[in-house]
Image (tube, rainbow, N blue to C red):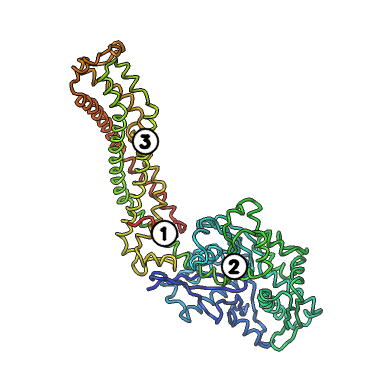
Amino acid sequence: MTRELIGLDFGTTNTHLSLTPVGEKNPVGRDIRVFPQNAVQTVLLYAPKESRVIAFGQTAQEEWVSMSRSERRGLKLAANFKPITGADPVATKESDLFLTALFQHLQDERFLSHLSSDNHTQVVIGLPAEADPSYRGALSTIFTTMGYPHTPFFYEPWGALFYHYSTKQIDKDHLFRGVLVVDFGGGTLDCSYLKDFRVRQVWGSNVLGGQLLDDCLYQLFLKQNPGVDKAFRDEAVEQYIRYILFREIKEKYSNRLTQNLTLPFRETIWVGKDHYGDFEISDYSVFLSLLREYTVSEDLATSLSTIPHAGETLTREPFDLSAALKETVLKAFRAQKVPKDAVSLILLTGGSSRWKFFQEMIAEEFPHTRILSSEDPEASISRGLGSGYSLVLFEKQVKAEIHASMDEITDRLTSTYEEILHLSMDRSLQVTSDLLRAHAEPKITRFLEQGGTFTDLEKDLSAGLLELGESLTLAQEEIRARAFKQIETATQKEFYRWFDTRGPFFSRQNDLLLPDPLMAQMIEKSLANRAFSTLTTVVSVSFGTILGGVIGLSGVAGAALSGPVGWIGAFTVGVFLTLASFLGFKGKITERMKGVRYPPWMLKVLFPSKKKALERVFSAQTKELDRRAREEWLQFALEKPKLKQQIREYTERHIDRISFADIISLQETEEKYDL
């Protein structure tokens, strides 16, 4: 059975749905077309007394218009109920009836493969930025009653952003640097700042939506047709003209502005066979002046007053609506919560984002930032919600599987790290021995050939110690860096191996949750070679610090791996002891003994072979280095359980941080690591 995700953008003007099948090789979200258009008008025709639905969407509007006055008696054509859902009992009931009728229709007409009771369909709901908790609670109750418990909510801009990324209209560089999504819809103005594909800041207004523009134009209509309100035969006609007809007129005018700003815009107002007057906007400047001197109508103000904090924005005093919209968009920037230079791209979505004045305002405030206007702003959110949530499920599945395998992963990584440290220590000791010999051998040779005191030899060996120490430090830093890189690469290879061994699990039908088209490429090539190339980068970035922890635990930092300049002094003492043993001295060398001068002939007699003498000197020092290294490694073995626990903690901590931002960096990591 194919699992399905429904992306729902429940809007004030229109409602959009998309269906994303999950578990297929290339899951593609598609619009659910209940009517010829993609959108379902958020309109309901019902009988309030018995809560009986007559029709919804476009059908509700058409049915109502075709009815006679007597047929309309006892019925209500409801619109604009979405913004006050949760705050107003009647609106909440109308949302319930509308959504229940809509989803029942989806099942009856077989838009859905399975009934929700089979748990093969899940609804993902878009949430406005400033939605009151009562709104979310109301929708949760509605969908739980319908048979969709635990319905997830995501901010609507998140869905819009994912859709535009998955269709390659936005590249990953913008996602990492920061994107401002401005969703100007029918009932709200929602702004979100997203970085690394995570929502960082959310703000907006739950009343500054396109419905205010409807109201603005409707008031102009009343002014142009004095007394027309008295001509309405009943309240239902007025509500239809105000909330439905002028919504359509607003959209027509907005579309006209994209083509011509100078020609007058005219509409004749009909309801069935009844004519209620004419409407005209002579030019664009007239419309802009209306926005600058807008006063919300009494009816709309009363309706929106149930929304928490609505009175802070809407008063019965004239105000500049365009300025209010601008200040809302800039709110987070004014408060310095988001710097403007942290925005690499602005995405405009929502039906009202098409307005010319709104696009010009955004361009003026962000003159150096790329602005992307959604080609289909009404539908982008629903499309992105379903496929985006499938990725969230995929992340959870990957994390759960890795956590379940932590014992295996920890054992393998501990063994691998131990081997790397062994090799690094061996290399470090060899480099140390070579540098010390290169420094000391010519000086010891000169002493054996020319004679002198041990004090003279000590001074000679001490000359150039600063330069020797710098050489040792550089050499050890190189070894340390190489060990860091080996640990990082080994970690990545281990997680590649982990993915390889579980390939069948993650590619099995109905279990893999992958959005399209982002993740489909991972199936076409090798899942292991692509997906975890980035996931392991996140995990292993901090594993460099593990080596530091290992060094600290084992004590090797004072020995072979951390610039062991301390070996120089011990080496000098060792040289004296070895040479002194040839002279018959045993035990500690005193200052008096160091002052005895040995002529060349005596040293030649005592050391007939300089080569053997040098080998004996350096052999003794090599053994001493090895002895100290064994002591350090014994200490490391004692600390190994602690290291193992550290590896587990580091891994689990960073597995939990794996996110969409990590998964999308697939292309460049595949090029870096051909495993």
> Could you tell me if residue 52 is visible in this image?
no
Spot occupied by residue 421 in the image (x, y as percentages of width and height): 30, 41
- The residue where tag 2 is placed is 373
Question: Looking at the image, which is closer to me, 247 or 94?
Answer: 247
Question: Looking at the image, which is closer to me, 469 or 439?
Answer: 439
Secondary structure under badge 2? strand
Spot occupied by residue 127 in the image (x, y as percentages of width and height): 56, 64
Q: Residues within 10 Å of mark 1 (few under 14, many from 20)?
A: some
Mark 2 vs mark 3: in front: 2
Rendered position, 576 above or below 102? above
Disc ID at residue 479: none
Secondary structure under badge 1? helix
**Residue 121 lies in quadrant:** bottom left
Which one is earlier in the sequence, the residue at label 2 or at label 1? 2
Mark 3 vs mark 1: in front: 3
Residue drawn at (29%, 33%), measured in percent from left and top?
A: 434
**Residue 117 lies in quadrant:** bottom left
Going by the numbered disc 1, the residue's amino acid type is Lys
The answer to whether mark 3 and mark 1 are in CB contact below 8 A is no
- The residue where tag 1 is placed is 396
Residue drawn at (37%, 26%), measured in percent from left and top?
A: 465
Residue drawn at (74%, 72%), measured in percent from left and top?
A: 284
Q: Is residue 592 left or right of residue 319?
A: left
Going by the numbered disc 3, the residue's amino acid type is Gly
Q: Report the Cα–Cα distance between label 2 and label 3.
A: 54 Å
Spot occupied by residue 337 in the image (x, y as percentages of width and height): 61, 51
Which one is earlier in the sequence, the residue at label 3 or at label 1? 1
- The residue where tag 3 is placed is 552
Going by the numbered disc 2, the residue's amino acid type is Ser
The answer to whether mark 2 and mark 1 are in CB contact below 8 A is no
